[in-house]
Amino acid sequence: MVNADSMQLYRGMDIGTAKLTLAERGAVPHRLLDIWDVTETASVAEYQRLARIEIDRLLSEGRTPVLVGGSGLYVKGAIDALEFPGTDPGVRAALEQELAEHGSGALHERLAAADPEAGRAILPSNGRRIVRALEVIEITGKPFTANLPGGEAVYDAVQIGVDVARPELDERITLRVDRMWEAGLVDEVRALEVQGLREGRTASRALGYQQVLAALARECTEEEARAETVRATKRFARRQDSWFRRDPRVHWLNGAADHRAELPRQALALVERAVTA
């Protein structure tokens, strides 16, 4: 298994990302989990490099890599011909200064005007990604999403998505957040804060972690942080769904509670069909 969840790359971010425990990983080797400190800024280009090393190594051994996770750009970067524009320190510095002075909301409005699709895909609170998108637009003179080519595949991959109706998904999200709190998310964030989580430009924006950090800073109550985590996760799930729905290569399986037991068999059938085709 090769991890494609951008936040499960971080060491110590376990409860809030629903990361499998060491015992749950069992006899199946898991790659690209717990590789970065929370102070490290995530890079899709670096993830692409690391993921392809793992995928190529497994293929050379005659094994089938299984890429698991819902970070759409990370999945696309790993399996598709996706090249990332460089950076311009001057442009980046100017945008980061604007972010510090005016907040992410103002920059997100500019991004939505310049590239509506990127505006819909990137959360208004995600200042780092907004800055990067605006930087790419200024460097290339093209919309950020125009720099993301379509489905030019690097690997013959079978892509599988799990389709859950919105009411059931919202209920699952609320239940998951409740379980995160019961499992000790607040204590996990408090411990990671000592390790520099608040200064981590990527990790500090993770769902749940961002909200708990706000509560620890007394910017809101813990209950308000919990409720905002539910709301933010539901918004993210909608964006995540929209991202993968645009790719016609994804095979959608029914993930409703009364169909869940069938998912492994159906997924395996899709993979076997592709192998024998």
Image (cartoon, rainbow, N blue to C red):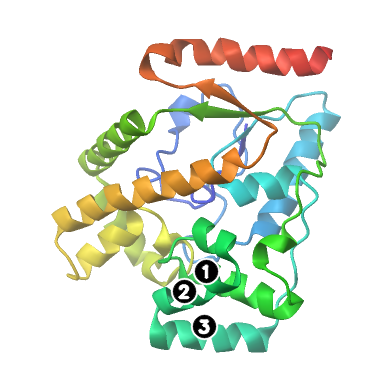
Measured in 3D between alpha carbons, the distance from the residue under mark 1 to the one under mark 2, in whole angstroms, is: 5 Å
Quadrant assignment for the N terminus: top right
**Label pair 3/2, CB-CB below 8 angstroms:** no
- Locate residue 56, reporting x and y percent: 81, 38
Using the image, tell me which numbered label, if any, was put on residue 96: 3
Residue drawn at 64 percent across, 77 percent down: 135
Q: Which residue is mark 2?
A: 109
Give above or below for 131 relative to 208. below
Measured in 3D between alpha carbons, the distance from the residue under mark 1 to the one under mark 3, in whole angstroms, is: 17 Å
User: Which residue type carries mark 2?
Assistant: Glu
For label 1, count other residues whose C-alpha is less than 10 Å away and answer few (under 14), some (14-19) or many (20+).
some
Q: Which residue is mark 1?
A: 112
SS class, disc 1: helix
Give above or below for 40 relative to 48. below
Give above or below for 134 relative to 157. below
Instruction: Say whether residue 275 is left or right of residue 15.
Output: right
Front position among marks 3 and 2: 2
| Sooner in the amino-acid sequence: mark 1 or mark 3 | 3
- Locate residue 153, reporting x and y percent: 80, 41
Please indicate, yes or no, whether residue 4 appears anywhere in the rendered image. Answer: no
SS class, disc 3: helix
| Sooner in the amino-acid sequence: mark 3 or mark 2 | 3
User: Which residue type carries mark 3?
Assistant: Glu
Please indicate, yes or no, whether residue 245 appears anywhere in the rendered image. Answer: yes
**Label pair 1/2, CB-CB below 8 angstroms:** yes
Name the one closer to the observer, 223 or 13.
Answer: 223
